[in-house]
Image (cartoon, rainbow, N blue to C red):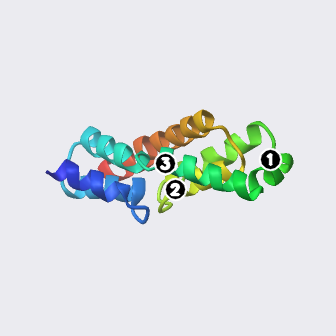
Amino acid sequence: MEIFDVFCYSIMPISSIGGGVELGSQLELSVWQSCGATLIGGLLPVPFLLLVLGALSRRLGIAEKVEKKVRGILSGIIVLVIAMIPFLPAAPWISSAAAATLGMSFPKALAIICLGSVISAGIAVGIQMYG
């Protein structure tokens, strides 16, 4: 039941990845249980956010304007850095909004956000919470 609590807590944008791992350590879950439930919960809304915010960004013409100024690998680095900030509330949500605004493709944005979240939860937050 504690794993489900961590999963549900991680879905909320105010807590996200950092809060989920912290709750897992307080509930005395193993590192793997805590990080697994946190990552699944934290990344569950990302595909939906990318689809909705990407469509909205294209509809409003924001993506084309920003995409001209920020090209190629720089947009990927921006989204990765945002997703990797360990204790930023709603990091996957904010990085999804950044990816949509930058006009990134869905698979590329999803892969970068997942990579950044795994690095953030697995290394920075996991080591700090579990010693």
> Few, some or many C-alpha atoms within 10 Å of disc 2 (few <14, some 14-19, many ≥20)?
many
Q: Tell me which numbered mark, 3 or 2, is placed earlier along the sequence.
A: 3
Q: Residue at 73% across / 59% down in the picture? A: 60
Using the numbered discs, state the Cα–Cα distance from disc 1 to disc 2 in whole angstroms. Answer: 20 Å
Task: Give amino acid for label 1.
Answer: Glu
Task: Give amino acid for label 3.
Answer: Phe
Task: Give amino acid for label 2.
Answer: Trp
Residue 28 in view here: no
Disc 3, SS = helix
- Residue positioned most to the right: 68
* Residue of label 1: 67
Above or below, 105 against 81 in this view is: above
Q: Residue at 76% across / 42% down in the picture? A: 74
Quadrant of residue 31 within the rendered picture? top left
Left or right placement of residue 80 versus residue 49 in this view: right
Q: Position of residue 104 (x, y in %)?
A: 68, 41
Q: Position of residue 122 (x, y in %)?
A: 41, 41
Q: Residue at 63% across / 50% down in the picture? A: 55
Disc 1, SS = helix
* Residue of label 2: 93
